[in-house]
Image (spheres, rainbow, N blue to C red):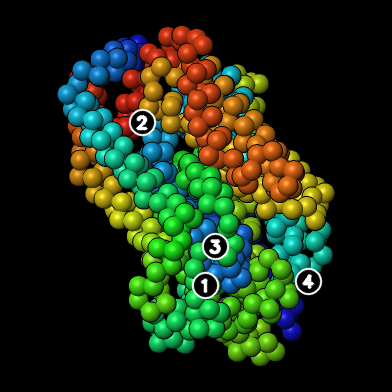
Amino acid sequence: MEHLREQQLLKEKLSHIDENPKYQKLIAEKKSFIVKGVIFFVIYYFLLPISVGFFPEIMKKQVIGSINLAYLFALSQFFMAWILAYLYVQKANKVFDPLAEEIIKEVKGGA
Amino acid sequence: MKINLAFTLFSIIVLITLIITYWAAKRTKTTSEFYAAGRSITGVQNGIAVAGDYMSAASFLGIAGLICLYGYDGFMYSVGWLVAYLTVLLVVAEPLRNSGKYTMADVLAYRMNNKTVRSVAALSTLTVSLFYMIAQMVGSGNLIKLLLGWKYETAVVVIGILMVLYVVFGGMLATTWVQIIKAILLMTGTIVLSIAVLAHFDFSLVKFMGAVSQKFGQSFLEPGNLYKNPWDQISLGIALIFGTAGLPHILVRFYTVPNAKEARKSVVIAMLIIGTFYILTTFLGFGAAYFVGQDVVKSFDKGGNMAAPLLAQYIGGGPGTLGGEFFLAFIAAVAFATILAVVAGLTISASSAFAHDFYTNVLRGGKASEAEQVKVARLTALTVGILSILIGILAKGMNVAHLVALAFAVASSANLPVIVLSMFWKRFNTAGVVTGILTGLIASVGLVMIGPDVMGKEAAIFPLKNPGIVSVPLGFLGAILGSYLKVEKAAEEKFAELSVRANTGLGAEM
């Protein structure tokens, strides 16, 4: 009985979670980072086949010795991916995780 | 000499993996242990295992070969395989871990009609796994024949039996450790060879590229030697970027860690390993071209698959020397371990889709006991293994190059849209899942059937090798339009619950 009642209360709370300011903040922060991040990396990535495929002359330009723009741009994709991953983890550890913890505490604590 | 050395190394790897399987079997009794290693894998371990699950022999031997024969284009091809992990990291891994239990379908079933969505999700999961498995089986049969001189059929049977042993007895725990060992062996081999290559050029990238350019002409370092149609590359890129996050055998890995934070850590570790691997592959490919020579590489295999093993032989001291033969044998053994790790991952994800989604939840309405579930899961793994061996033998000599691309196309067009929409769109419902998965599945398979890989370049109705550029938008469109066919109140009401769970981990499976 006790257990069922608790679950009922939890369900009740969850149905109004949209009004919880901390939850709103978490969703907004996440959405903002993820949408920007995805748009950025998708554009950056597809610039590679596009520039190499449609503007090969520019990409053949040698930058250091025999190393050309095409190679450097392809190589930069790896670092782009690592840096974006690093930024995401930083943001998640500093902003998303603490907010999520507080929300869980509020929901569970009050139930 | 060569056969003996390589065979010894093979045997050592097999022995170690079987000991692990024995150890894991004693710890694999419940469904959670069988499908998800009891959620006992750490983020770092899982990251290494994801890398081991993902980097196939096709990327290790194939991409090195492409770079050896076609230069720059081979390197460009490898980029998408890493960038794709950003989709896994930012969009899929954590919410999936928080909201599911063992399979991709768990996430869909949270809000929708359980039986319906699980049936279609099992269909697309099994399709992806089947295409991927055939490609791996045929590829490995050929590779082992090349590396060891075994008969094609022998190679397929040996690999099939080993993967069945790992999965049936050791479940996800054994699979994980096979993948970890493979990743460590693969990275060791790649790093050692790369250092040896670069040491010849005083560790200067400029000197190295300069030497390659001098020997083969600057055009070897320029785009256009292999890929003539940029749209092919763009379409393949779409399938990779959105398909990796829909590959069932990758997704199930995130259920093996205790929480979303560890899942996040796994993706980052996997990205570090996979990225380093692809960057270093350039040195293997160019190194093989420079030291071994393209003609020699081609004389062993037209596709260039022997570039890395032959480079190893050269680095070790050349053909006939003890060092040369040892290095060659070592790289051959690494390739063997690579194949085993990938097919084991495929076997367990196919088993979970059938046993957990279809048998337990659809046929038995979720009422099967633990013991029954585990038994069915093991039987399924055995069946998957036997079927894979049979199909592998039947598909001998088939051109399977397009099958991996097709697996990615289905994953990106059928799986990813419904995963994303079920987590982020309130209006999404059962009808949308069904139409989304079916549209994506039919579009990607259909477009490949009428594309140049199947019909031939001249007769092809659809001009691109990979259907991604058309089939991914179609998959999303099908899912969205399908949702508007019906109103499903229950699915909308449960959205808040799923969203809280996906975003905070509240109520996630422990």
Please report contact status of discs 3 and 1: CB closer than 8 Å, yes or no: yes
Q: What is the C-alpha distance between the residues marked 3 and 4?
A: 35 Å
Q: Residue B149 carries which label?
A: 4
Residue sitting at the far left: A21
Residue appearing at x 57%, y 21% in the figure: B434
Q: Mark 1 points at which residue?
A: B219
Dot label at residue B502: 2
Residue B439, position as x, y percentages in the image: 59, 27
Q: Which callout, 2 or 1, points at the residue further toward the start of the chain?
A: 1
Where's the N terminus of chain B, which quadrant?
bottom right
**Comparing marks 3 and 4, which lies closer to the viewer?**
3
Quarter of the picture containing the C terminus of chain B is: top left
Q: Residues within 10 Å of mark 4 (few under 14, many from 20)?
A: few
Pick the residue in front: A104 or B411.
Answer: B411
Rendered location of residue B26, percent (x, y): 58, 49
The kind of residue on which mark 4 rests is: Gly
Image mark 1: chain: B
* Above or below, B483 relative to B193: above
Few, some or many C-alpha atoms within 10 Å of disc 1 (few <14, some 14-19, many ≥20)?
some
> In the drawing, what numbered circle is on residue B224?
3
